[in-house]
């Protein structure tokens, strides 16, 4: 797989006006849901790789409750 391909935006559950949740069904291996803290506009403007990245965090050993993504969620583009 080429890095950054086959990505999709998850079905987000609105928790509040600034809290959105990605369910564990989004990506195989997610141990906890991912919570994103951002306005709807910021969420809509995020690169698809941000959703993939926070889903990857949710698969890490030892993680409990939630993986968190702050409003400045972004990918590292210095490759």
Image (cartoon, rainbow, N blue to C red):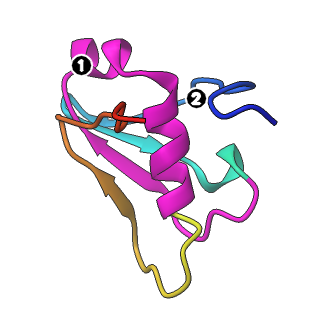
> How packed is label 1: few (under 14 Cα within 10 Å), some, or many (20 or more)?
some
- In which quadrant of the rendered view does residue 43 lie? top left
Residue toward you, 68 or 16:
68
Determine the CA span between mark 1 and mark 2: 16 Å
Q: Which residue is under mark 1? A: 42
Secondary element at tag 1: helix
Residue toward you, 31 or 59:
59
Secondary element at tag 2: loop
Magenta stretch contains residue 34: yes
Q: Residue furthest right?
A: 1
Residue toward you, 4 or 23:
4
Q: In the rendered view, tell whether residue 18 sits above or below residue 8.
A: below
Residue 47 location, x and y as percent? 42, 21
**Residue visible at 20% across and 44% down in the picture:** 70
- In which quadrant of the rendered view does residue 42 lie? top left
State the extent of the magenta-drawn residues as a range: 28-57
């Amino acid at each position: 797989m080429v890095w950054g391909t086959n990505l999709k935006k998850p079905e987000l559950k609105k928790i509040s006006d600034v809290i959105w949740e990605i369910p564990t069904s989004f990506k195989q291996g997610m141990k906890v849901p991912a919570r994103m803290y951002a306005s709807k506009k910021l969420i809509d403007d995020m690169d698809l790789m941000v959703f993939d990245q926070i889903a990857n965090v949710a698969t890490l050993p030892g993680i409990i409750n939630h993986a968190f993504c702050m409003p400045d969620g972004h990918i590292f583009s210095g490759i």
